[in-house]
Image: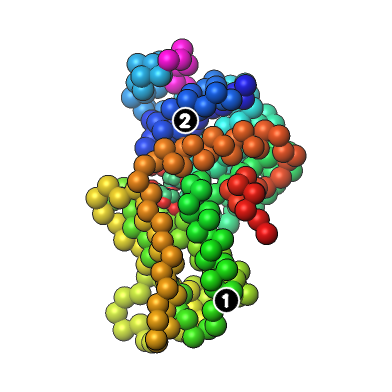
Amino acid sequence: MIDVTVTGVSGRMGRQLAKAVEENDRTRLVGATVIEGDPWAGQRMRDVLDLETDIVVEVDPLEAIARSDAIIDFTAPQATHDHATLAAQAGAAHVIGTTGLEADTLAHLSRCAVHTKIVRAGNFSLGVNLLTVLTRKVAAALGPEFDIEIVEMHHRHKVDAPSGTALMLGEAAAEGRGIDLAAHTESGRHGLTGAREEGAIGFAALRGGAVIGEHSAIFASTGERITLGHIAEDRMLFARGAVTAAIWAHAQKPGEYDMIDVLGLRD
Ligand SMILES: NC(=O)C1=CN([C@@H]2O[C@H](COP(=O)(O)OP(=O)(O)OC[C@H]3O[C@@H](n4cnc5c(N)ncnc54)[C@H](OP(=O)(O)O)[C@@H]3O)[C@@H](O)[C@H]2O)C=CC1
Ligand SMILES: O=C(O)C1=N[C@H](C(=O)O)C[C@H](O)C1
């Protein structure tokens, strides 16, 4: 059995993650955390989420992580930064779904990965990870006469843009084309923008309603257009992928990994 803590358990993803850990016969929920002041703090998981476990929701992640083989963390950038320190100290695998991480946190994760295994992905679904592989291949096959645009739509509560998945797709397209994404990104067009830069990779982010996550990679020439896309219809998709990643990470050496490694999709 792999003992798992879910951080941010009262969140949209936290709830699904706790269920996914408990439904998998190789994992067991041994910790569940929330931020101070959250109504779930101090409550039994069986009372707030109808799970058959005696786990009580905690505010301090220290002890929960210390008794865990793995933590699954879909929270917020500062929380993930802090959890990484604790996971590295405890030697617990750290599965990270949090998006919108800044460069200082990414550098911190690389230092933590000397001590433990980190699996980080902007999207833990099989479909999106296959889509990134396809996007890289299509970008490599097409010439610069094809403009690349990444379009995403999410629910009204999402706080970061472009989404982590959109950035994965942009990175894949840039890799396929043999260019640096940061140097070719065009996003947030508004007003008198001028014509599209040749070779740019464009990003457009839509927000509204309860959309779980929709992504397209569009390759447009003057004569034809190819669209590769993915629609997520249930958050359990991401949660089950993250549990698969925790089980996989348990058997790995310390280091930084992503879902392409977990799924064995790397060429
Ligand atoms: N990689 C993937 O496959 C996916 C990634 N995501 C990403 O996961 C993250 C969470 O998304 P979502 O569940 O929709 O967001 P929510 O806001 O619903 O959940 C995040 C939860 O984390 C809590 N939290 C914040 N800081 C801490 C902390 N220090 N300790 C414990 N809990 C904390 C928040 O509490 P409070 O609300 O009180 O701040 C909230 O309950 C986002 O970055 C999102 O982009 C989402 C889906 C799939
Ligand atoms: O915030 C979300 O909800 C999602 N976030 C991830 C992202 O930023 O791509 C994954 C998924 O699309 C849902």
Quarter holding residue 93 = top right
Quarter of the figure that contains the C terminus? bottom right
Residue 114 pos. (x, y %): 74, 43
Task: Tell me if the residue at label 1 has its CB under 8 Å from ligand 2.
Answer: no
Q: Label 1 amino acid?
A: Ala
Tell me where the magenta segment starts and ends, as one range: 52-58
The local secondary structure at tag 2 comes to helix
- The chief SS type of the magenta part is loop
How many marks the image carries: the answer is 2
Residue on which disc 1 sits: 141
Of residues 15 and 134, the one drawn nearer to the viewer in this rendering: 134
Q: Distance between the residues labelled 1 and 2?
A: 38 Å
Quarter holding residue 254 = top right
Q: Which residue is drawn at 53% across and 53% down?
A: 129
Relative height, residue 86 to residue 66 (above, below): below
Q: How crowded is mark 2: few (under 14 residues within 10 Å), some or many (20 or more)?
A: many
Q: Which residue is drawn at 43% across and 83% down?
A: 221
Residue on which disc 2 sits: 20
Circle 1 or circle 2, nearest the eye: 1
Residue 165 pos. (x, y %): 47, 56
Quarter of the figure that contains the N terminus? top right
Residue 130 pos. (x, y %): 53, 56
